[in-house]
Image: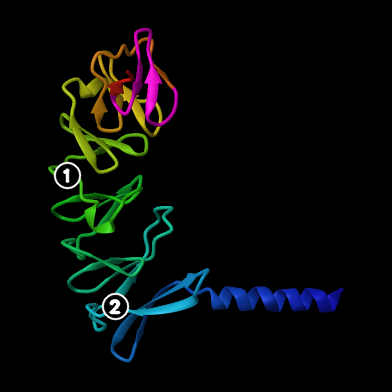
Amino acid sequence: MKNYTIFFGLLLTSLLIGCRQGYVVENGHVFYEYWNEVSGQNKKLLEKADAGTFQKIDFDCGCSFTFGKDKKSVYIDGKQIENIDPNSFKFIGNYTFADKDSVYFFGFYNDLNECAIKGVSPNKITLLKYPWSKSGKILIHGNDTIHVGDIEEFIPVDEDWGKTKKKVINKNKILIGADPATFEVINSYSGKDKYHVYEFGKIKE
């Protein structure tokens, strides 16, 4: 039994060492190491990264990302993120980050370089329940925005739905004519009230 314990301990240690992920500076270059189930352990050269100023960044954000920065750029999982100021880049909460000029949401996305919340100042954003936030009369879902006149009455229902006393909102769409008092969520994109069934922000025909 003792030999088996030692064997499995060594095997686990080997696997942990073999599955490295993060940034490495070697011989004047910056590399990003990562594990892929198909190709195994990989090491990618970050051609534009400045080795002399590169450093890892740690945020207590509950994210699975690996952050890094040099004098010009921020890097997330080895990808250079354009137009973010590395010196003022900080974590706000709920997968939301900011620099001196802009706010970014990295909770879900198609492209890490398309995560800026347009038209929102980092000094004027209030976080609500993930992934909702607001700035003045602008309601924010992820990095999508919509103007809501009675935003002070907004209550998140779940990650995809919210409502005010007069409006039902699905992500960044107001359901025209929907009755908040009788509205029920069906799934992430559909719901119903006493009048209609709605899908993708519209009455289902």
**Residue 136 falls in image quadrant:** top left
Q: Point out which mark residue 46 bears.
A: 2
Question: Is residue 83 shown in magenta?
Answer: no
Q: Which residue is mark 1?
A: 123
Residue 192 % position (x, y): 39, 16
Horizontal relation, residue 181 to residue 177: left or right = right
CA neighbours of label 1 inside 10 A, class few (<14), some (14 to 19), many (20+): few
Residue 69 % position (x, y): 27, 70
Q: Nearer the viewer, residue 160 or 55?
A: 160
Q: Residue furthest front?
A: 205
In this figure, which colouring scheme has been used for the structure?
A: rainbow
User: Which residue appears at 23% of the width and 74% of the height?
Assistant: 70
- Report the mark closest to the observer, 2 or 1: 2
SS of the residue at dot 1? loop
Question: Is residue 197 shown in magenta?
Answer: yes
User: Which residue appears at 32% of the width and 34% of the height?
Assistant: 128
Q: Which residues are magenta?
A: 186-201
Location of residue 88 with respect to 145 vertically, above or below:
below
- Residue type marked 1: Asn
Location of residue 12 with respect to 62 vertically, above or below:
below
User: Which residue appears at 44% of the width and 23% of the height?
Assistant: 186
- Residue type marked 2: Leu
Q: Residue furthest top?
A: 194
- How many numbered discs, if any? 2
Residue 157 % position (x, y): 39, 25
User: Which residue appears at 27% of the width and 56% of the height?
Assistant: 90
Location of residue 52 with respect to 32 vertically, above or below:
below
SS of the residue at dot 2? loop
Labels 2 and 1: the sequence-earlier one: 2
Q: Point out which mark residue 98 bears.
A: none
Residue 141 % position (x, y): 28, 37
Dominant SS in magenta? loop
